[in-house]
Image: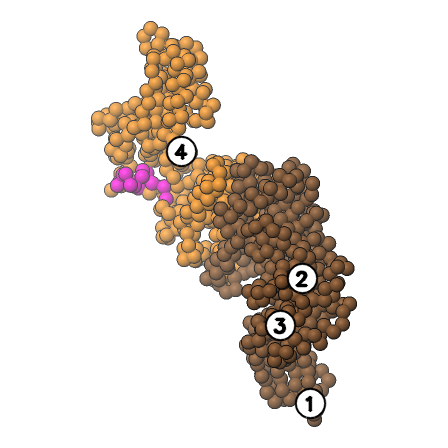
Chain colours: A orange, B brown
Amino acid sequence: MALIVQKYGGTSVGDLDRIRNVAERIARTRDQGNDVVVILSAMSGVTDQLISMAEKIHTPPDAREMDVLLATGEQTTVSLMAMTLQAMGYKARSMLGYQAEILTDNRYTKARILDIGAERIKSLLAEGQIVVVAGFQGMDASGDITTLGRGGSDTSAVAVAAGLKADRCEIYTDVDGIYTADPNICGKARKLSRISYDEMLEMASLGAKVLQIRSVEFAKKYDVPIHVRSSFNQEEGTMVVHEDANMEKVVVSGVTQSKNESRITLRKVPDQPGIASRILTPVAEAGISVDMIIQNTRLSNMTDLTFTVPKSDFDASMAVEKKVAEEIGAAEVLGDENIAKVSVIGVGMRSHSGVASKMFAALAAENINILMISTSEIRISCVIEEKYTELAVRALHTAFDLDSQ
Amino acid sequence: MALIVQKYGGTSVGDLDRIRNVAERIARTRDQGNDVVVILSAMSGVTDQLISMAEKIHTPPDAREMDVLLATGEQTTVSLMAMTLQAMGYKARSMLGYQAEILTDNRYTKARILDIGAERIKSLLAEGQIVVVAGFQGMDASGDITTLGRGGSDTSAVAVAAGLKADRCEIYTDVDGIYTADPNICGKARKLSRISYDEMLEMASLGAKVLQIRSVEFAKKYDVPIHVRSSFNQEEGTMVVHEDANMEKVVVSGVTQSKNESRITLRKVPDQPGIASRILTPVAEAGISVDMIIQNTRLSNMTDLTFTVPKSDFDASMAVEKKVAEEIGAAEVLGDENIAKVSVIGVGMRSHSGVASKMFAALAAENINILMISTSEIRISCVIEEKYTELAVRALHTAFDLDSQ
């Protein structure tokens, strides 16, 4: 008998029929003799509807009130799920964020979990109840409702699993698991049976949309194994776990791509100490996060500085830099939205050399020009022209022996 | 500067435009220098939608989970209202039942308010906030959400007003106030400027649907003056207050009717001590409330016993009594669903005599036969054939000088 936390996303609880299907899956887990805690999202689409209603009133709506409004979405699904389980003859109880003692800071709409007081859940489990907890929501120290940001139910699930010291945390979603590449782009992509937390963090931040990044950080910190799997079939999905010796044998675990990048170049900048800071600080002050930065030294005390920002911040960044260019006497500001970032990821890189050169060679073989490069301990990313994205992903997938037979 | 509690019902907050209209009314009250606490219902129709969704799962749905589900309705309106007030430049904060410390017993779906801890509302008022409280909902001692039953937001409003010792409690609804009779039946009905709590209690239980009965009991107990008025115009409505000398000059304040009655007669019952109890206890045990009871003594140790029950409980009551009739040897059980109850109400009855005979004469003048009679200190009710209901109301309205010019 184990204690299992299961999280179901919005499409899995999208209507009463789907809630019934999920309830049957929960019941099976219970019938096998396990204690079960269920974390639910709002019905798919509901959160967006509520946001658009609020934005008709005022943009942006007050964040505290937004959280009060958004929290109704999960409140609805947990009560309906508890009723459904009861109708099937099971003991079940819903718990809202404040009742489950999910304590957060008070950064409304993007709060972070500080603590889980799992006592109330534990005592309900001891009564034989299936406990159905509203995901995505918590309570701050003054008793106000907070929400955890998009995908926050994943983090709720991992946090509750950590608080309860659960044996497993299962994240049910509308995909089968984590793939070596996006199957829509790369037909030979394979489902991974295991992936390390660190790889998953790199994958999540680079465009794989399966798990909220923070949930993975939380799982790593509190050593919670996550099982990502589909709520529409019974197949095993992907385990997200601490890295082990076996994983290190594989050089690259996955290839990702992101088209949400854009780049800005300031040409012929006077090459003085502190000039990079004068160029980049105004962008940071506008709340825009810069990803890669490259500085090319030129002749005659002039340099070019290039950096990337999210595509959604491109216009704002260009406006900022045009002002900066005038102030510092740069020749011109060039912008490019037609770029993409492809990355290879794997904990095996720590113990294998030659990964970068293999990557560059694979791209060169397809005549794909590399515009920028950045690396971490377990990742190499290249910025390329956007039109080559899919070709690059497939080429790298093959080059690193990831293709399925 | 006064402390004013305003309650707006579901039709008044039925969509974003209406919420905006209500917000403007709240803002005016605030601009006049008052502290304002607002109590809101769910958008009209929402509560019924939620109930019907839950009933698709199981009938009846679990009461605790029902309350979790239903509470989302008011949670939505209070957050939208707070956002709207903020968009207009006012400081505003929503409060859910548990945040406003509305403590109830744990009779889910029909909980009673035990206590209001008004400290949090008071401290928000001290900050200059307009406080927008979710009506209809509270919290029991273990932190679970409870709801107060249909019309419960009225009781929330009066309870909060009592807890805050507010100067006024204004109940905004879709009617102008309390009328001397139902204007749909009696064209000459007039709006009352004042009515006593006791009269209002008799009116509410006899079919006027303006205020939840419990809110009036609460207002009477804690001496909260209620102003019932329309949210669609600026006119003064009706004050519900303690009775005063002026009210006693008027013999009858209003005429009401109810078609929700049915009656059951057991004929030729052996006239033994305890026989009424043997007939009525099984009905009570079935959870059905009996209103009027009449026993006609007949010759030869036989009696007829007649009582009324709500029409919705008629079939169940007939089934119970057929069994009882067999056990006690009654001759037959007769049922009649085509009856109505008309009543005249007024605190003036305490000091005036002849009200009953005037009522009987007025009905007799229209050839309306009286089937049963019951009275309280400030009310006389007659059961008549249902088809005469409207005629009876108009005749009594005229007889007691209530007609408008």
Ranked by sequence position, the earlier of labels 2 and 1 is 2
Q: Is residue A77 visible?
A: yes
Residue type indicated by callout 2:
Met
Task: Report which quarter residue A24 is drawn in.
Answer: bottom left
Q: Secondary structure at mark 2?
A: helix
- Discs 2, 1: same chain: yes
Closer to the eye: label 2 or 1: 2
Residue type at the position of mark 1? Arg
Circles 2 and 1, Cβ within 8 Å, touching? The answer is: no
Tell me which amino acid carries mark 4: Ser
Instruction: Say if A160 sits above or below A281 in the image.
Output: below
Disc 3 crowd, CA 10 A, few/some/many (<14, 14-19, 20+):
some
- Quadrant in which the N terminus of chain B appears: top right
> What segment carries the magenta color?
A177-190
Q: Which residue is mark 1?
A: B298
Residue A40, percent across and down? 47, 49
Q: Are marks 2 and 4 on the same chain?
A: no
The magenta stretch spans residue B130: no
Task: Return the x and y of residue B149 as percentages of the image width and height.
Answer: 59, 59
- Which chain is indicated by disc 2? B
Mark 2 or mark 3: name the one nearer the start of the chain. 2
Q: Main secondary structure of the magenta part?
A: loop
Pick whichever, A289 or B136, lies toward us. B136
Q: Which residue is mark 4?
A: A205
Per the image, the residue denoted by label 3 is B395
Position in image of residue B267 (x %, y %)? 62, 87
